[in-house]
Structures are given as structure tokens and as C-alpha cells.
Image (cartoon, grey):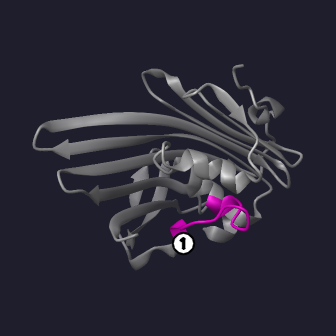
């Protein structure tokens, strides 16, 4: 899986991260759609938003070595020193989707824990994600349970289920990916396209 990501020449995905919060007061959820596009060696773009919130768009884009970011909060564009720094700014608010796959695509540029850093791994039952047969890996990631669904043909990540326990609530994340590698990418997918 790691080799597939680090050696592909182009990559695109679209997906959603759905976080469900469980507490004594009930259940609530939040959906964060995202999209990634990359052409090696210099073009990259990631964007996410929060469904139902028109003021939550976050963009990280690199073209020919120049990195730019936009976040609707504060309505500002910035130019971080590196792609890694640009993605780090988006990681927490995106629920981690700004980091998970970019860290596999560009492991020398994007630091931090990667999916390959899981511990206590074991093979789970094979599962179906849409039309795709998947291997599942059950593991621990930073002390929390995680299940990674890996496409049996392409070795791309199709889904990640994780859970975190806090003092007064539990959060459950389900991230669904629709990835494509080594295909022609529409140049418009890599444009910054930030509001000004």
C-alpha cells in the first residue's frame, strides 16, 4: 500500500469524513467532504469543507514550488514555507483528512504519524466497499482502534474507521475514499481557486 502511494505519478480522490459524537446528551454528527489531486513532482491540491457550513472551506495548493493556503475562517490567503506546513495547518480542522493520504503520497515532505505507523495489527475479515473488495487491517493508531480498508486490486485505501475516547464523549470517524492513480488529471483540479 505504501509503495503504491509513494510511487504513483498522479493521484486524485474525493471523499467524506463523517464524525459521530456520542455522549450522555445524545448523538450528533458532522460530515466533511474533501478532494485531493497530485501530479508529480510539483503540483498538489487539497480542499475540504464542512457540509452545511458555507464558511468552512480550506484549500492547500502547490504549483511549481509555491505553496498557498486559504481558509474561510479569517478569509485569508497565506504562503507557508512548505507543503508540509500548509497541510499541518489544515490537519486538525479537517479531522486528519488533510494529512492521512498526503503523508503516504509525499512521505519525505509531509511529516507526522502515517497509516504505516499502526501497531498491534491483525488481518480482519475481507469487506466490500461499494464495488471494491477490500482487505481490512485492524490495529491501534496513537492508542486508538482503527480499521483500514485496502482495495484488493489497487492497494489503495478505500475506507478508514477509527474511534477515540474522551472524558465525557466518544468520537467515531468513518472516512470514505474514491481514489484514482496514474490517470490523466484535468488541470482545473490543481488550480488554487480560492475566493478573494
- Residue 142: x percent and y percent? 40, 69
- Taking depth in this image into account, of 67 and 38 the one nearest to the observer is 67
User: Measuring 69% from the left and 56% from the top, which residue is drawn there?
Assistant: 84
Left or right: where 16 falls relative to 78: left
User: Measuring 79% from the left and 29% from the top, which residue is drawn there?
Assistant: 188
| Magenta region includes residue 107 | yes
- Residue 122: x percent and y percent? 38, 77
Circle 1 crowding by C-alpha within 10 Å: few under 14, some 14–19, many from 20: few
Q: Residue furthest right?
A: 64
Quarter holding residue 130: top left
- Residue 82: x percent and y percent? 76, 54
Q: What residue would you read off at disc 1? A: 116
- Residue 153: x percent and y percent? 59, 61
User: Measuring 17% from the left and 51% from the top, which residue is drawn there?
Assistant: 168
Q: Secondary structure at mark 1?
A: helix
User: Measuring 37% from the left and 64% from the top, which residue is drawn there?
Assistant: 146
Quarter holding residue 36: top right
Q: Examine the residues drawn in magenta and state their main secondary structure.
A: loop
> Which range of residues does the magenta coloring cover?
103-116
Give the quadrant of the N terminus.
bottom right
| In the image, residue 106 above or below residue 74 | below
Left or right: where 128 falls relative to 42: left
Give the quadrant of the C terminus.
top right
Left or right: where 115 falls relative to 13: left
| Magenta region includes residue 93 | no
Q: How many marks?
A: 1
Amino acid at each position: 500500500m505504501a509503495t503504491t502511494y509513494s510511487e504513483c505519478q498522479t493521484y486524485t480522490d474525493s471523499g467524506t469524513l463523517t464524525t459521530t459524537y456520542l455522549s450522555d446528551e445524545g448523538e450528533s454528527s458532522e460530515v466533511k467532504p474533501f478532494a485531493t489531486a497530485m501530479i508529480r513532482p510539483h503540483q498538489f491540491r487539497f480542499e475540504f469543507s464542512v457540509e452545511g457550513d458555507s464558511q468552512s472551506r480550506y484549500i492547500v495548493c502547490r504549483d511549481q514550488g509555491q505553496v498557498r493556503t486559504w481558509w474561510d475562517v479569517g478569509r485569508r490567503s497565506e504562503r507557508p514555507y512548505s507543503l508540509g506546513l500548509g497541510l499541518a495547518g489544515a490537519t486538525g480542522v479537517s479531522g486528519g483528512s488533510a494529512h492521512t493520504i498526503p503523508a503516504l503520497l509525499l512521505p519525505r515532505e509531509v511529516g507526522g504519524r502515517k497509516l504505516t505507523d499502526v501497531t498491534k495489527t491483525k488481518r480482519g475479515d475481507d469487506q466490500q466497499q461499494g464495488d471494491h473488495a477490500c482487505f481490512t487491517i485492524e490495529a491501534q493508531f496513537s492508542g486508538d482502534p482503527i480499521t483500514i480498508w485496502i482495495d484488493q486490486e489497487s492497494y489503495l485505501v478505500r475506507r478508514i474507521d477509527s474511534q477515540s475516547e474522551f472524558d465525557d464523549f466518544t468520537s467515531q470517524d468513518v472516512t470514505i475514499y474514491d481514489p484514482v492513480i496514474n490517470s490523466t488529471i484535468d488541470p482545473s483540479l490543481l488550480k488554487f481557486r480560492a475566493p478573494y
